[in-house]
Image (cartoon, rainbow, N blue to C red):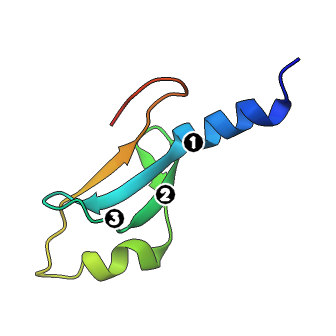
Amino acid sequence: MPHPENGLTALAGAATVALQPADDAALWGSGFFIAPGWVLTCAHVLAPHLRPGHGSVFHVRGSGPAGGPGE
C-alpha cells in the first residue's frame, strides 16, 4: 500500500514554482500555486526586482500537474 505522504509530496511539488527574470536564468525565489492564475510568494522575493525602472517582466516556472511537464 502506498504511503500517504507520497501523494502529498507529488502535489506539493506540482504546486511549487520558480520565479525568475524573463531574460536571465537566475532564480529570484519560489512560490506556490494557490488558485488558477494565482501564485503566493513572500514580498521579499519579488520586491527588489519590481522597483520602478528596474523592469517587471518575469517567468513563473513549475513542473505542471503531478506526473507531467509544464511551464
Q: Nearer the viewer, mark 2 or mark 3?
A: 3
Residue bearing mark 1 = 13
- Give the residue type that dot 1 points to: Gly
> Quick check: marks 2 and 1 in contact, CB under 8 Å?
no
- Location of the C terminus by quadrant is top left
Name which residue lies at 53% across and 24% down: 67
Q: Which residue is mark 3?
A: 27
Name the residue type under label 3: Leu
Residue that label 2 marks: 31
Tell me where residue 12 sits by quadrant.
Answer: top right
Is residue 34 visible in this depiction of the protein? no
Amino acid at the residue labelled 2: Gly
Of labels 2 and 1, earlier in sequence is 1
Q: Is residue 45 above or below residue 39?
A: below
Q: Residues within 10 Å of mark 1 (few under 14, many from 20)?
A: some
Q: Would residue 64 be found to the left or right of residue 10 on screen? A: left
Q: Residue at x 63, y 34 (%)?
A: 10
In this orientation, which residue lies closer to the viewer: 58 or 26? 26
> Sequence-wise, which precedes: disc 1 or disc 3?
1
| Circle 2 Cα neighbour tier, 10 Å, few/some/many (<14 / 14–19 / ≥20) | some
Q: CA distance from mark 2 to mark 1?
A: 11 Å
Helix, strand or loop under label 2: strand
Is there CB contact under 8 Å for labels 1 and 3? no
Any part of residue 15 in sight: yes
Q: Classify 10 Å Cα crowding around label 3: few (below 14), some (14-19), many (20 and above).
A: few
The quadrant where residue 9 appears = top right
**Residue, x 44% and y 32% (percent of image)?**
64
